[in-house]
Image: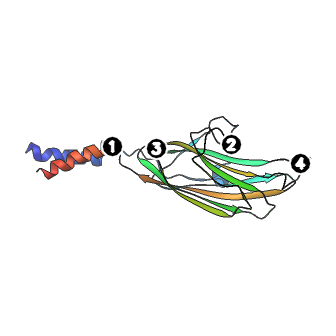
Amino acid sequence: MIAKVLPKIQLIFFLSLPNATAGILVYDESTDGDIASPPIGDPLNPIFNLGVGVNTVTGAMTHDTRNQSDPIQFPHDFDSFAFSVPNDGLLTVLSINATEDQGDPGYFRWGLYPGNVGARLTSPLLISAITVNASKAWEYRLDLNPGVYNLTLNRFGGSAFPRQENTIGYKARFSVQQVPEPSSLAIFGIGALGMIGT
């Protein structure tokens, strides 16, 4: 009798394990606030917690040199934010859609980095080529383990684009797939073996 009850208890325990995954992230600068990049070397804060499913961050960046006295400058707008992949998840797809607004031309680039201290201090895991007048989509298949990473997007002018103004919109999508933790698999395995033996 005890042998028959024990596997059921183990299975119920497995099914009732808490899920550490946060809810799906949907962040939009237009309603949730501007993503402001700190000085280089400072930690990015807050760190967005991704959930299982498709998480999105939507924003816009502008460079404006129309009223600058020195026409040969490199004005820019960085959007840098950190995010965490949950302990029971894998980041499997990263996609970025950029849409050029009407206006003057400029440069656009983005990079994916480990940690939460922003770009240019660590080697990128992924980085795009510099594009001009970007209305473009990127998509990458990944297997990023749990941890903290950051995405840095950069809109900037340069000597080729003096005294100009332009805005680019973007949407970044992070697809997270749930992966059972090893301890959960072990408990499930014990319960399954017990049921087979009854």
The answer to the question of whether label 3 and label 4 lie on touching residues, with beta carbons closer than 8 A, is: no
Pointer 1 or 2: first along the chain: 2
Q: Which residue is mark 2?
A: 37
- Mark before the other along the chain sequence, 4 or 2: 2
Query: Splitting the image into 4 quarters, where does residue 181 fall?
Result: top left
> Which label belongs to residue 182?
1
Q: Secondary structure at mark 3?
A: loop
Which is more foreground, mark 3 or mark 2? Answer: 3
Q: Residue at x 33, y 43 (%)?
A: 182
Quick one: which residue is furthest to the right in this view?
69
Front residue of 24 and 188: 188
In terms of depth relative to the viewer, which is nearer, 62 or 16?
62
Residue that appears at 56% across and 60% down? 139
Taking 157 as reference, is 124 left or right? left
The spot of residue 24 in percent (x, y) is: 49, 53
List the residue tagged with mark 3: 146
- Asked if marks 1 and 3 touch (Cβ < 8 Å), the reply is no
Amino acid of disc 1: Pro
Q: CA distance from mark 1 to mark 3?
A: 14 Å
Could you tell me which secondary element the residue under label 1 belongs to?
Answer: helix
Q: Which residue is mark 4?
A: 68
Earlier sequence position, callout 1 versus callout 4 = 4
At mark 4, the secondary structure is loop
Identify the image quadrant of the N terminus. Answer: top left
Alpha-carbon distance for marks 1 and 2? 37 Å
At 13% from the left edge and 46% from the top edge, which residue is drawn?
5
